[in-house]
Image (spheres, rainbow, N blue to C red):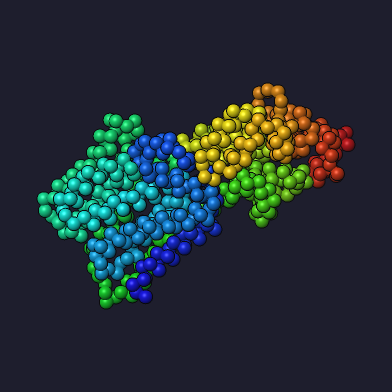
Amino acid sequence: MKQYINQIFSLVFGLAVFTFFAFFYQYHLYYQEQYQLFLFTGDYFTQMSYHIGGLAAYLGSFLTQFFYYPKLGAIIIAILLVIIQELILFLSTMMKRQSYWTLLTFIPSIIYWNMLCDENTMMTGVAGLIITLLAASLYMLIENGWTRMVYLIAFAPLLYVMVGGVYVVFIFLSIVIEYFYFENASTSAIIGTVGGVLIAVFLPYVCSFFVQAPLNRLYWGFDWYRFPIVGIGFYLSIWVSVVLVPILFVVIPDMKKHAFFCTTAQFVGVVLLIVFALYNGYNKQKEEIMNYDFLIRSKQWDKVIQKAQKKSPNTPMSVADLNLALAKTGQMSDHMFDFFQRDPQGLLPDFQRDFTLPLVTSEIYYQLGFVNTAQRYAFEAMEATPDYQKSGRVLRRLAETNLINGEYKVAYKYLKILQKSLFYRKFANRTMALLWNEKAINADPEYAWLRKCRPQKDFLFSEAEKDMMLGTLFVHNRKNRMAFEYLMAYYLLTGNMQQFAKCFPLGKSIGYDHVPYTYQQALKYLGKQMPQSK
């Protein structure tokens, strides 16, 4: 049993990581997946790998595509974090085989677990760190000192090109292995140490003369984080821990007589560190917002409402999702005010120059029938992505909007890209059959309806006059119940009761079988405030 204790701890740790991401943080994985698109093409490999750290970025994108199915993504994350722990365990136990401090090897993986709770932490870093640890493990297996020296000095620059700034971990691990494992202080070790340190210090600086990139990013790395600006503590927390754990293995005295106490203390410490990491990293509010966004994206309208009935949303983004679900299920005019309503921002959010809110707003405009506006918002969201990645979700929407507008050549361009992906290929193949096929498009319930709803004539869309835009949309197709209900909801949320009363008779064309409850209450209020309106 004792010889399997480390494997048991690793298995339990992996199960804990899987459980967390599969059942408590799954919508963060959906969020990650939608802001990149891995393509199985040579051009994509060249594009991704043609910069410092490109191989790690390519592998990170490859892994992220599987987050399309969160449980599969959770398995991948769990396996990768266990691999990191096992590689550190291998390096540490090779330097000191009889040690009772093996649970220390979980520390870097726990730190990375905490980092992955941030939706902007990319999988590039995980891939790069594993490659680096494999390179260090290979260094440990080389018997000859001069061969190790040549390997260190020759391979470090190549590793830098492959994984970026994390290559310094390989250099310092190699130095630690040289002195603590091989106990070598000969000329080869000194040359390797000096050469390795010089490479760590000056290689990024030399590259700055040939690569157009900020010097700090050349030192710390690319694509570890979605945003280009991130504190160095983000990198140091994981890099230092990876190098420090094998050193602690060697320098901390054995406690053979107190082995049980030692293991118990480590176990408690690891559990407390996990609790602290998750307490510090887990963001319940963001997970709920991402949950709403996923349900809207997958058109699970009833589940959106059921979720809101348990706990009413209170952020503009989630309130907008709820109102869209109410409208799509025909409940908006009756039950809108059963839930918390903020202001018109919870109905039709204003455009913001970021990559998150425009996607939600694009979904609303798309379902309303503002096809061109939905297309603009989706495109702007993708172009605002900080790491310049293309989005599978956005490309799918752009293909749909161009299909509806009859721009088949443009739709074809987007669908050809999606055909080269893994999880969007089925949609692309199915939609490709609709191109230049008016009969097939008109037989599709969604596309045919949106073609009837979309304005046929050009007009200037004004965010400052959303009521006029909604009115224009409704006048174009008086069967567009959603446009009418959004217009009436807009007047109620802005307190424009006169316009509400003026537009109320237009609802006759919708064919309501009763006066919606919300409208009844509004009319009662009008009757009390303005008797002449009765």
Marker count (numbered): 0
The image shows residue 304 at horizontal and vertical percentages of 66, 50
Q: Is residue 396 left or right of residue 389?
A: right
- Residue situated in front as seen by the camera: 530 or 433: 433
**Residue farthest to the left?**
187
Asked if residue 490 shows in the view, the reply is no
The image shows residue 5 at horizontal and vertical percentages of 37, 71
> Can you say which quadrant of the picture contains the C terminus?
top right
Taking the spot 68% from the left edge, 38% from the top edge, the residue there is 367
> Can you say which quadrant of the picture contains the N terminus?
bottom left
Q: Is residue 386 left or right of residue 429?
A: left
Taking the spot 65% from the left edge, 35% from the top edge, the residue there is 434
Q: Is residue 473 left or right of residue 221?
A: right
- Residue situated in front as seen by the camera: 115 or 33: 33
Q: Is residue 384 above or below residue 331?
A: above
- Residue situated in front as seen by the camera: 229 or 108: 108
The image shows residue 285 at horizontal and vertical percentages of 56, 51
Taking the spot 48% from the left edge, 59% from the top edge, the residue there is 18
Asked if residue 392 shows in the view, the reply is yes
Corner quadrant of residue 52: top left
Q: Is residue 134 above or below residue 396?
A: below
The image shows residue 447 at horizontal and vertical percentages of 69, 36
Q: Is residue 85 left or right of residue 193?
A: right
Q: Is residue 21 above or below residue 499?
A: below
Taking the spot 16% from the left edge, 54% from the top edge, the residue there is 144
Corner quadrant of residue 207: top left
